[in-house]
Structures are given as C-alpha cells and as structure tokens.
Image (tube, rainbow, N blue to C red):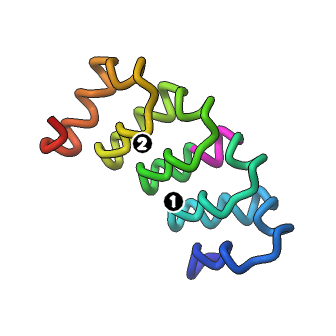
Amino acid sequence: VRLNAAVLLHAPKEFQRDREVVLEAVQKNGWALRYASEELLCDRDVVLKAVQQHGKALGYAAEELQADREVVLAAVSQDGAALRHAPEQLRCDREVVLTAVRQDGWLL
C-alpha cells in the first residue's frame, strides 16, 4: 500500500476494512478512500486524512462527514473544487467558500 494506494481496489475485502491499511493508503493517495469499506467511510480520522491528501475524496465520505465543517474545510483547503461535495449549508458558509476560493480562484 505504501507504493500504490490503488492496490486497495484489488485487495481482499478484509484489507479494505482494515483501518491501518486504509489509513496508510489514503495518506499516500486520498482517492483510495473510494475502495474503503462502508464502515471506514464513516471514520472521521480516515476521511480527514484522505481529504487532506486529495480534497475531492470528500465525495466518497459518508454523508454525515460531508456535512462536517472541519472535514469540508480540510477538503477545500487542499482542492477548492471539493466544495461541490459539501451540503448546501456549508456551500453557503462564508469561511468555507473563502477557503475554497483562496485555493482555486476560478470557483466563482
């Protein structure tokens, strides 16, 4: 997993449920979150690590974490376009939008 986070795609389900393996993967490639188990898509620490590495990984997170302001701020800090995965109340949050625009001025 250290060399190629996408290995989770081909890994047995037991590894997709293994928190340590998934954490290692998402720290290398946030997109690896898409191959994590449903349980880990609800794990705040796993999702936070993923979006800090690749903001758009927010789109794979559980709905409640897509609505978590700190998680969304981390995501838009990394990639302003991750704003599209946030719920409306956070897309209307001035600080969230300002953070996204600072990262990617083309958002407006």
Residue linked to disc 1: 30
Q: From the viewer's perspective, is residue 4 above or below residue 71?
A: below
In this picture, residue 9 sits left or right of residue 85: right
Task: Give the amino acid type for the residue marked by disc 2 in the picture.
Answer: Ala
Q: Which residues are magenta?
A: 43-47
- Please, what secondary structure does the residue beneath circle 1 have? helix
Identified by mark 1, the residue type is Gly
Residue annotated with mark 2 = 75
- 35 on left or right of 28: right
Residue at the image position 20 percent from the left and 36 percent from the top: 101
| Main secondary-structure element of the magenta-colored stretch | helix
Residue name at image x 53 percent, y 27 percent: 67
Quadrant where the N terminus is found in the figure:
bottom right
Disc 1 crowd, CA 10 A, few/some/many (<14, 14-19, 20+): many
Screen quadrant of the C terminus: top left
Q: Is residue 98 above or below residue 45?
A: above
